[in-house]
Image (spheres, rainbow, N blue to C red):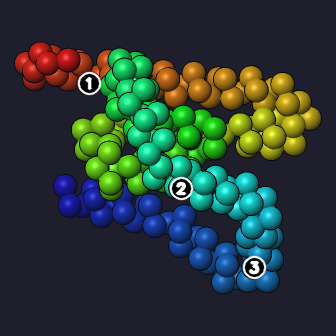
Amino acid sequence: MIQRKTLRSALAALPILAAIVCLLISPAKYGKSITEGISLWAVCVLPATFPFLFLTALFTQLSLFEGLARRLSPLFSRGFRVSGAGGCAAILSALSGYPVGARSVLDLYESGRVGKEEVFRVACLASTTGPMFLVGAVGNGMFSSPSLGWIMLACHFAAVRACVLFFEIFRKAAAARRGDFET
């Protein structure tokens, strides 16, 4: 058992060590690529993400958020087995994209508004790509077709919904195997 663990660890380390060797062999080449990647992130990703992170963090602290969470609670508890606060995090993620959803889930969990038993389901729902990326960057920027971006976004949201439904099916099957009939 320990030998398998050591072997897996060694295999996982190989690509990391290969990357380090490549950086050491040709630091100028890879240094330039790293600088370009960081520059691209700073120019394209950060400006698109930071305002959403900042504004959604403020929004989750408002009493309006709590009211919206109460109103959404019946819909999200029936459809996804999550609280209204978790549903709000999913909506924020759908509007803003992945880092915002993940940060919202963490903030809600740390403040006790999303419980330990639902945080996994909320994280699944709130791990979405936002329209700004799929429609703007991918659809319009890469494929010159915003409509293709909207199609990809709809497929992405459908896939998130399907994953949550599959997790629920597996949860019920596991509960049945354990003899836990509470669903």
As drawn, the residue found furthest toward the right would be 144
Question: Where residue 144 sits in the image (x, y, percent)?
Answer: 92, 35
Residue in the foreground of this view, choosing between 116 and 92: 92
Nearer the viewer's eye, disc 3 or disc 1? 1
Q: Nearer the viewer, residue 42 or 103?
A: 103
Q: Mark 2 or mark 1: name the one nearer the start of the chain.
A: 2
Q: Please name the amino acid that badge 3 sits on.
A: Gly
Quarter of the picture holding the N terminus: bottom left
Measure the C-alpha gap from mark 2 to mark 3.
37 Å
Of 96 and 16, which appears nearest the observer?
96
The answer to whether residue 183 is left or right of residue 83 is left
Left of 153 or right of it: where is 108?
Answer: left
Tell which circle, 2 or 3, labels the residue nearer the N-terminal end. Answer: 3
Number of callouts: 3
- Which residue is located at x 71 percent, y 37 percent? 131
Name the residue rendered at 58%, 70% in the picture.
Answer: 18
Q: What kind of element bears circle 1?
A: helix
Tell me where residue 15 appears, x and y as whole percent.
54, 64
The reply to whether residue 177 is in sight is no
Residue on which disc 3 sits = 31
Residue 58 - label: 2
* Residue type (three-letter) at the residue carrying disc 1: Arg
- Between residue 171 and residue 56, name the one nearer to us: 56
According to the picture, the residue beneath numbered tag 1 turns out to be: 171
